[in-house]
Amino acid sequence: MSQTLDATPHALREAYYVLSTAQEVPDAKLLDDIVRRYPQFGQELTEFAISIAVDALRGDSVVEAAEAAIDTTAVSPAVSRAMSHFQNRLHAHTTRAPEVKSAHQFADAANPFAGLSRSEYRAFAARLNANAVFVGKLRDRQIDPLTMTPGFQAHVAKELTAPLDVVMAHFSARQAAPTGQFFKAEGKPTAGAQQSFEEAVRNSGLSEAQQTFLLEL
Amino acid sequence: MARPLRNTDSDGALYTRPTVVEVQIDQAIGLSRSDLGTRLSITDHSHPAYLRSECLVHLVREGRRTDDQQLMSSVLPVLLARCEANLLVKVPDGTLPDASGIRQQILEDLTDLFVLDGGGDFPDELDFYECRFNLAFRSLRIDGVRRAMRRRGRTIRTVDLPTSDVSGEPDAYEDAFARVSENFKVLPTQEWDVFREPFVKAIEALPDDEREAVILVHVLGYKEESENPDEETAATRCKCTGRTIRNRLSRAAAKLSRFKEDL
């Protein structure tokens, strides 16, 4: 994985996208909403929102003019290098296709949240005695499964009406960080930052009663 | 019909592409390669046959999914050329150390998303790019620049501005910041274009804490502070007191006061 993507945890990258794509210029309400969803990244998101705002101040008219002036009959050296990078990475990736493909199929099959509609998602959060923020962390595998209590895992499986082993496989799938020699980062890539179960319960905007309930399962 | 997106929002609902993108994808998928090449050569955004970047992302993903090398090789360079044009404006030479290296890294980061599409720890990341490409790419770009600067242990080079005593210039404070807020709401305007570059440079030249206070209060719309302990304010976002925020705003106003006449 590249330096940029590898160094930014998946959940933070997602939060950045949500913040950037929701509005041209973020406002307080949007930032508050997103920080509530990703409370562990409050400082990063605040700084990112400020960067977006300053960037927006410059406007995009110059960018549009630059794009309109592109010579489509020639490929620039930068684009040529990027295409070469892409082809090399693609080749390297596909040579390990069986391993990767099976991992993906497993992840797809094991995600018990994938088929939930909006109303089902909310209803599940209610049955769990939690909220959408907390369920989002479960869905996105932001919680270390080793810190979850057996009672909580069983509670999730019951309310999802899914087999316990499928639910556990979903939670554990995130641990399979991409490995291999095809990375530019200084260190081996790791899975995105995960919270402990207790941290996730404490930092998801749950009421005291909800926190107590979940932690005592 | 284009394959549905798989990413979900905070309520668990699937993201959806804008209708105009859906329509364009349906058209583009049915084009012969020759006709697609013709469409890809159009760079004028206002041209009715111009293919939006969201559509190009979908085509490259489709090429990746079906192992269609020809499709990827014809569409991806066009998308990358647009991104390069964007980066040359947003990350120009001279404003950052090794700006060209940062631009290249961001382009390659984008190609990595296609390589890893459907897998890895964020399999549906490109869904954002099929919905609002420019804003998604903005996120990638800003993150890439900030990370590059942190790796280099430097901050963005800025221009020193003369300081002045804000206490004697309350009007400058009000005028300048009122105009900042106003112009953020109506970007872009011809009048604003005249002052855009020097004003942005002045904002960027502010110390981090002062710039944060200005943007949080006058752009994002936070109160400086609140008696309600549950209300987020500029002070809570910056983990400081309301008085500190006001001091930062005052110092920033002093530095920006030279724009009073221009604004």
Image (tube, rainbow, N blue to C red):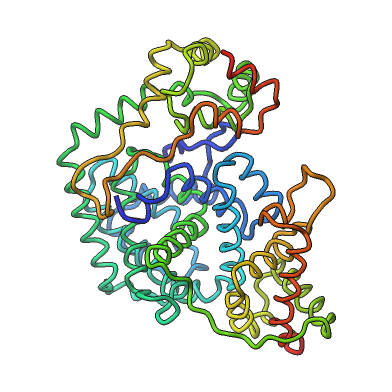
* Residue B129 image position (x, y, % from top left): 45, 51
Of residues B157 and A1, the one drawn nearer to the viewer in this rendering: B157
Q: Is residue A215 above or below residue B140?
A: above
Residue depicted at x 35% and y 27%? A173
Q: Quadrant of residue B194?
A: bottom right
The number of numbered badges drawn on the structure is 0
Q: Is residue B215 above or below residue A112?
A: below
* Residue B11 image position (x, y, % from top left): 60, 33
Left/right placement of residue A64 relative to residue B116 reads: right
Residue depicted at x 43% and y 43%? A10
Residue depicted at x 43% and y 48%? B25
* Residue B36 image position (x, y, % from top left): 33, 58
Q: Quadrant of residue B241?
A: bottom right
Q: Which residue is situated farthest in the left direction here?
A: A95
* Residue A204 image position (x, y, % from top left): 61, 33
Left/right placement of residue A135 relative to residue B167 reads: left
Q: Quadrant of the C terminus of chain A?
A: top right
Of residues B49 and B172, the one drawn nearer to the viewer in this rendering: B172
